[in-house]
Amino acid sequence: MNQSAFAERVRLTPDKLTKSLKGVRRFTSLDLALIAEETGTTVDWLLTGRPDSRPAFAARTTDESLPQRERVSAVAERYVAAYDVLKLLRRLPELPPLPEVRSDVPLHVDQGRQLAHEAAASLGADGRPAAVPELETSVLAAVCARALHIDVAVVDLPPGIDGVTWQTNGFRLVLLSPTDVWTRQRFTLAHELGHILAVDAQEPVVEGRIRPGRDRALTEMRANAFAAGLLMPETQVRDRVGEAAAGEGALSQETFARLVVDFKVSPSALAVRLRQLGLVDTATHDRFRQLTAENCHLHVGAAAEYQRQQSWAEARQFPTRVVSQLFRAYEDGETTLRPVAALLGWDVDALHRVLDPAPVQDAAETDEKDPVFTP
C-alpha cells in the first residue's frame, strides 16, 4: 500500500500524514488509534515500541492447567487493553485511597473484620456507612465503582472459575462468572473485594470455589472474614437474633429464612456465621445448612426478589464506568469504537450499526404506494 492509500484508510489527507511523519505535525490520539487499528498493533506499541505484557496469574482454581490459565488471561487482557487506552487518553482517573490494614491487628481473620468495618464506611455516602446487607448485588457493584473505583464485570470465565481479581496502580478489577447460584456470586464479590482492600491482588488472582471456614491460606481466611463481616455485620446479626430469641426462645426456621432473605446470603453462609458468633449450636447449624436460598425466599414470600437477583447473576454485565469513559472518548473524536467493541466482545461494525443506525427515509420523499415504517 502506498502512502496516499494508507492516509485514506486512516482518515488523513496525504499532506497531513506526510507532515506528521516528518515531525512537522503531531499525530492526534484519534490518528494513533486509527493507525493502530489499521496495522493490527496498539497505540502503546506505536508510542513506545514495547510489546504487550501478558499477565502472569497466581491461580487458585480447580484446574490449574496451562490452557485454563491462558483462557483466563485472554479475558483479562480485554480489560487491560481498555485501561491502557484510557491511560493514553489521560481519561483514567486517579484511584481513591483504600482503607489500610492496621499493623496492630496481628491475626488475618481480625484484619478481615476490621477491613469490613472500614469498607462499609468507605462505600457510604454523606458521612454514613453503607448498609451493605440492604444493597442488591448490582447496586453493591455500582457503589464499589463509584466510591473506590473497583470495576466489577460478569463475564464468561472458564469452567471451575468463579472470580478473577487484579489491582495495579491504574485499576482495580473484579471479574465474576455468570451463575445460577446468585448467593455464591455475591459472596465471591465480597471475598474479592477483601483481596483488593488487603492489597492481595497485585498479581492477578484466579479463584475457584471459595470455601468459608475450610480455606487455610492466610489471605483466603482474611478475605472470607471480610466477606462475612461486610455482608453479615456482627452487630446487626446479633441484634436480629436477639430480637427473635426474645419472642421465640430458640431461633425458628421461619426466622432463619427471613434472615437469609434480609442479609442476601446463602443459608450455608448464614449458618456458619451464626455458629462462629456462638448464636446457634452445631445441631442447629447443621439443620439450617440443609435449606436453600430459593426455599427461604419462597417461604417468606420474597420470590420476586430472588428472581431479580438471579437474573442479574446470570446475565453478562460490563463495567459501566470504563465503557462510559471509552464511549465519551469516541464521541469527542479521540479514539475509534474499536476499544469499546473489544471490551464488550462485539464486532465493531455491528456496534457501529447499533450506535449509528442508517437514517430513516422521510415519508415526504417516498412514493405514495411505498410502505412507510416509522420506528
Image (tube, rainbow, N blue to C red):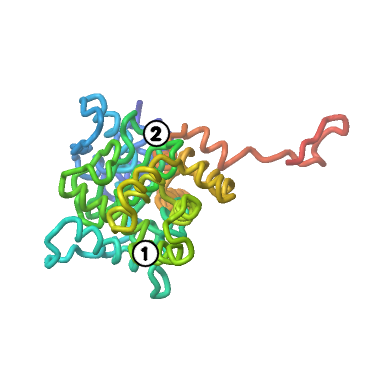
Query: What is the secondary structure assignment of the residue under circle 2?
Result: loop
- Measured as percent of width and height from the top left, residue 365 is found at 80, 38
Q: Is residue 26 visible?
A: no
Foreground residue, 303 or 36? 303
Q: Name the disc covering residue 156, or none.
A: 2
Badge nearest the viewer, 2 or 1? 1
Left or right: residue 360 versus residue 202 is right
- Measured as percent of width and height from the top left, residue 239 is found at 40, 67
- Measured as percent of width and height from the top left, residue 364 is found at 82, 41
- Measured as percent of width and height from the top left, residue 50 is found at 18, 40
Q: Amino acid at mark 2?
A: Asp
Foreground residue, 306 or 68? 306
Foreground residue, 7 or 177? 177
Q: Is residue 128 above or below residue 182?
A: below
Q: Is residue 172 visible?
A: yes
Q: Name the disc covering residue 238, or none.
A: 1
Placement of the N terminus among the 4 image quadrants: top left
